[in-house]
Image (cartoon, rainbow, N blue to C red):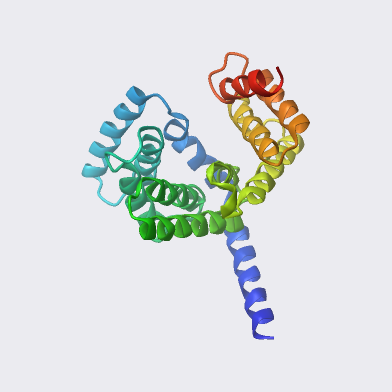
Amino acid sequence: MRRLILGSLLLMAGLARLLALDATGVTRWEAELAPAMMATEPTVLEGLQRDLAARLAGSPGDAGISTELGIVYHTMGRIQGGKKGYATQAAELLQKVADGPAPEELKVFALPYLGSALCLEARDSANPIATMDLLNKGLARLDAAVSRYGTASYIPRFLRANVTLALPVFFKQLDKGGSDLQALEAWTARDPGLMAPHLLSQIENLLGNYYKKKNQVDKAIAAWKRAVALDPEGKEGGREAAKSLATYAG
């Protein structure tokens, strides 16, 4: 009975949080954070990092700037590895936003990026115990982000799918990532203008990787072909999908 009551209270809290979200506010933050979320070129990231660090120094504790800079550090850590501690810097900034008094609409983005940053820290750690601790914390944050905000933005599911598909199968997170990708695919079918083609290509490429790991090669090839069609210049998901097609489609 206690478990039932607790579960009901958690569900009600989640619904209350979702109902309290302002869709216009989520859209505004998504647009404001877009330059940081879309940046992948090292020179662009470095320029953003310098500018945002200077702005944050002038406005210490600004939640919006902290989130944007945290996202930049997250991507730098993902691309460049752990030598410069970018993932740690990302997690420190994003945790202050996710656990602080920032607007709930901003936490839609801060919380999943925090989860992903913690998983990057786990990847970079040389201590097996610390690795597992960071990974468990990161996955828990990603699960919380999807539970709270998974219907407010595509970001929580997209980031969780990226993380879970990168993990070895024995972590038993693969189907969670596949479910996220299938949910995003269904979402875009209902709302075709929701995501740009370059992002859809990444989703289809990841979906192909998911099906490959499930030994469903025909479905994988179909998803990779969709990724290439969405990104024919091979700048995003189409590039990796084309490589996979060359290997598995002959």
Q: Quadrant of the C terminus?
A: top right
Q: Which residue lies most toward the top here?
A: 233
Q: Quadrant of the N terminus?
A: bottom right
Q: Nearer the viewer, residue 224 or 46?
A: 224
- Residue 220 higher or lower than 249, as above or below: below
Q: Residue 201's image quarter? A: top right
Taking 100 as reference, is 169 left or right?
A: right
Give the number of callouts.
0
Residue that appears at 36% across and 50% down = 91
Taking 169 as reference, is 93 left or right?
A: left
Q: Which residue lies most toward the bottom here?
A: 1
Residue that appears at 35% across and 25% down = 42
Residue that appears at 51% across and 55% down = 139
The answer to whether residue 21 of the structure is visible from this angle is: no
Question: x%, y% of residue 106?
Answer: 47, 49
Q: Nearer the viewer, residue 86 or 154?
A: 86
The answer to whether residue 80 of the structure is visible from this angle is: yes
Q: Residue 137's image quarter? A: bottom left
Question: x%, y% of residue 81?
Answer: 35, 37
Question: x%, y% of residue 199?
Answer: 59, 30
Question: x%, y% of residue 100?
Answer: 38, 60
